[in-house]
Structures are given as C-alpha cells and as structure tokens.
Image (cartoon, rainbow, N blue to C red):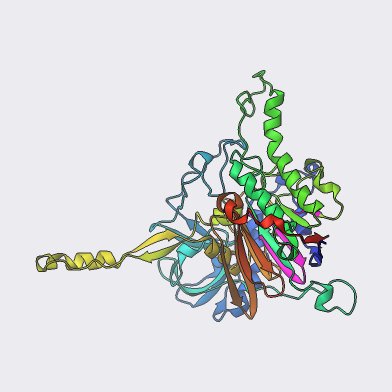
Amino acid sequence: MSTKIKRSFASHEPDWERYCLFPPSLTLQPYNNQYNTCYNARLSMLRERCLASAEHKIVPRIIELNENVPSTAVGTIVKSTPGRPASDTAYHSSYEGLSYLGVPFTQEDVFMNYCGEGDSVVLEDESGRVELAGDIDLHSLATGVVVAVEGTVGATGIMTVTKVHFPTMGPQDEIKLGGGNGSDSDVVSDGAHVLLMSGLDCGGPDASVSLKREMLLDYITGHFEAKEGSNVARVIVAGGGCTRPIKPENASLFGNWNSGKKLDSQDKTNMTLPIRELDLFLGEMCAGGVPVDYIPGLHDPTNANWPQKPLHACLLPHSVSFVNMLSRAPNPYQANIGGKCFMGSDGYNISDLLRFISKKKKKKKKKKKKKKDETHNDDDEAESNQENLEPATSLEALELTLMVNHMAPTGPDSLPTFPFKDKDPFVMEKTPHVYFAGNCDRFETKVVERQGLKTRLVCVPSFSKTGQAVLLNLKSLECIVLEFGNVEGVATAGGNDEEVEE
C-alpha cells in the first residue's frame, strides 16, 4: 500500500508590477524619450541614499566644486575602457546576437573582458563631470553606478578621492501573508524549499540534456525520492528555457522583403520547437502540483530590451491551462515567497557587467636560481609585484549590484533597456532576502550582511551545461546543489512506493 505525502506549502505574492510597465503600450511610442533621462532618474532616486553617511561639505552640483576644498559630490560613474570595441550600430538578428557570455554565438566559449590598465573614470551629473583619482578602485566600478565621493579637486581639475559612499540599503521586512494569527505556519510549512534552475535549453540538439530534464522532473514530482520531492514548494526558472534559434536555410535577411523565399512547414516546425518543448516541460511540473514562476531569458520570444515582459499566454497553451500553477513573470523578477523577498534575473545583467569589471591578481615571485643571475633580481622582483587584471566572478558581480542598489547598472550603456523618464525600475527600493542570477557557469553562494541586513546571494548554474539545480530552504536560506547526470546512480531510484499528494 502506497503512502501519501503532502507537498510543502509556501505563500506567494508577486511584486514585479513595476517591471511590467515598460513599454506602457506600443501606441505611446516609448522611444520618444532620450536615454539621458535614464541616468537622471537613477541619480534622483539614489542621491539621498548616497549622502546618508557623508562627512565633508556636500556640493549640490559637480560644477560647483572648488579647488583645494574637501567636498562631497554625488553623480554617476562613467568609465572609459580603451579595450572596448567601437559600438556596432548594425542590425543583428536573433540568430546573430550575443550569448550569456556577451560574445557572438560563433565564439560562445570565449569570454571578452574590456578592462585594462588604461581605464579611467569620471563622475557626472546634469551639470558636468570631474575626473577621479586617488583612493578608488576603478576596476570594480562600471558605467551607470551612482556613488558619492569625498575628496579634493586639484589645480589640474582632477578630484583626488579619499572615500567612496555607496547607496544605503533599502528596508527589509518580513512579509506576513495568509490568515490565522499571522504565524510562520500561515506563510510557509516546515521543510519547504524553493528550487532554482536556469538554462533548460529546450529544443536543443543535445539529447543528454533532455534526459537530465526528465530526471529533474521525476525528482520534483516525487518519482525518485517522494519525501525529498515533496519539500519543493515552488520552482523558479531563471531564464534560458529556450535554446538559441537556428537560422533556417531559406530564411531571408531582415529587411530583404523582395527575396521571394518563404519558410516551408519543416522550417516553421523547427523554429517553434524550443517554445513547444518548454511548454510541455512546464506543463508537466504544473500537472504534478508544483507551482512554477517562469522568468524569460535571452532567447525567449519576448522583447529584447529590459525589463522583459512575461511570455504571452498563447505561447504556453498547455502549461497555462493549469489554473494558478504557472506564474509568467517578467525579467527582472521580484516576489515574496514564504515571507521572504526574492529578487533576481536570468543573469544577462550579470554577464554584461562582467565585461566591465575586474580584479587585480599579484604575480608569484620568481625564485633565485644562480648567483650570476643576481643582476636581474631587481627586475624580476619588480615584475613579480606587478598586478595583472583578471575577470571578476559572477558572485562578485552579483554582490556589486547589491552594493550599488541597482540590478542593471550597465544599462542602457551596454545592456539594452527602454528609455524610461521619471523612475528607474531597476533601483532596489527593498533589500531582498534572496538575490539570484541565472545561467551562470557554476554554482556560487554567500551571505552578505550590510547595515545589519542579510541577503543570500545565489548564482544559479546553467542546467544544460552543468546538470545542476539549487534547492533553497525557506526557513534557514541554506542552499544545496542537486546534480543530474550520472544515469547509473539514479537508475534504481524510481522504485519508491510512496507518492506525493498534490
């Protein structure tokens, strides 16, 4: 006789309305605004938070800085990176775009970082700009970051920085949902977990990825270990659901309307395969009684500019038929789950930021071999003390966005965004309990504490590349990694006589 196990419960309240307002409609022409309004809105929202801990005289505008007078100014960082190639204004179709590594698809395994020793930064506001030098780590900053700097402007017009102030953190409140007496049991049940995954790569050519997805589905629905599978109260798919589209042979280039070539039925079937496979996969999870939040990603059929709108219901006819089971979320994402604030994205903002930040790595000192080489020791020691730049990790980039209280600081400079005017939707007005990024090359996590507020950072690995998903405990916020790939190790796990009651 089989034993029924009840699935864990966690309350869920979407908090992503502000991401769904751009563009308000196609008839309002969202591109009538200039992109400089994005930086003005961002600076206006973060100015007072940057000045909360200022010590020197506060200058209202950069143009009012005086020589040899210690002052504090607020502005937006503009970083000059000579290693960055010239902006390419040519049209790129979805077949010729960039991957999550920020490089063309033909070079997907090559990561490009533009940082170098010739980089420089200036602080800019609506009145002007001033070049920064001194006690400032310019390699850890990128264009679009709002900071307050303390320092003194010299005769050359360069400001020697003594201290940098980042915006203070927003409030972090426990969300109490549900009825009863407002206890934790009304919000989340004991043992409840959230499963974070990304990079499903539905419709891809690799059959092994399809097998791993089936194994993941069997785990969630309790066919392997019913007790463990029943702890999954909600699944968040952080982008990467659809594989990169493959250009059909008969497809004409964009704008070449007179080519006369039309796609045959097989080409149309191949083009829609990724979204159809994704719909079936999401539908199977919903049919198993598992609530799912789906965040669109780089290759999904939605708008390219951030924030990305949720996938239309007509694209997921099977999974949306399960009422109240599938939540079509925007990108970025924010929701209150089990009394905790979850915030994150598909990871494209992090991969874009990684191209513009780096860290310094000291070379190892060379050992002395012979006495006759003593004349070269000074040169060797000087070379050993040189600091070379290396790219930052995804976790470091994720932590930086939390520190600057902005989810997409490189937009609109390099990350495509809408030209919003009055309010920047990417500014973090709240401090999340869980902050994640999808489609990372490997799993990383840490707890960051600032101003007494703790946030769990999670880099969700790409499932198609690693076979890994992240299981997060809603009470303790501890993470464990689930890995699917060793078929022999799980072949005997399907004989459990327990089933999950949905």
| Front in this rendered view, residue 314 or 404 | 314
Q: Which residues are magenta?
A: 326-346
Q: Position of residue 169 (x, y in %)?
A: 65, 73
Q: Is residue 312 visible?
A: yes
| Front in this rendered view, residue 133 or 167 | 167
Q: Is residue 286 above or below residue 266?
A: below
Give the residue drawn at x 44%, y 66%. 157
Q: Position of residue 52 (x, y in %)?
A: 63, 78
Q: Is residue 262 left or right of residue 119?
A: right
Quadrant of res 125: bottom right
Q: Position of residue 183 (x, y in %)?
A: 83, 79
Tell me how many marks there are.
0
Quadrant of res 333: bottom right
Q: Is residue 26 above or below residue 496?
A: above
Position of the C terminus, as image quadrant, is bottom right
Quadrant of res 51: bottom right
Q: Is residue 384 left or right of residue 423?
A: left
Q: Is residue 98 above or below residue 347?
A: above
Give the residue drawn at x 76%, y 58%. 18
Q: Position of residue 344 (x, y in %)?
A: 67, 60
Q: Is residue 417 magenta?
A: no
- In the picture as drawn, the residue positioned furthest to the right comes out as 180
Q: Is residue 131 visible?
A: no
Position of the N terminus, as image quadrant, is bottom right
Per the picture, the main secondary structure of the magenta-coloured stretch is strand
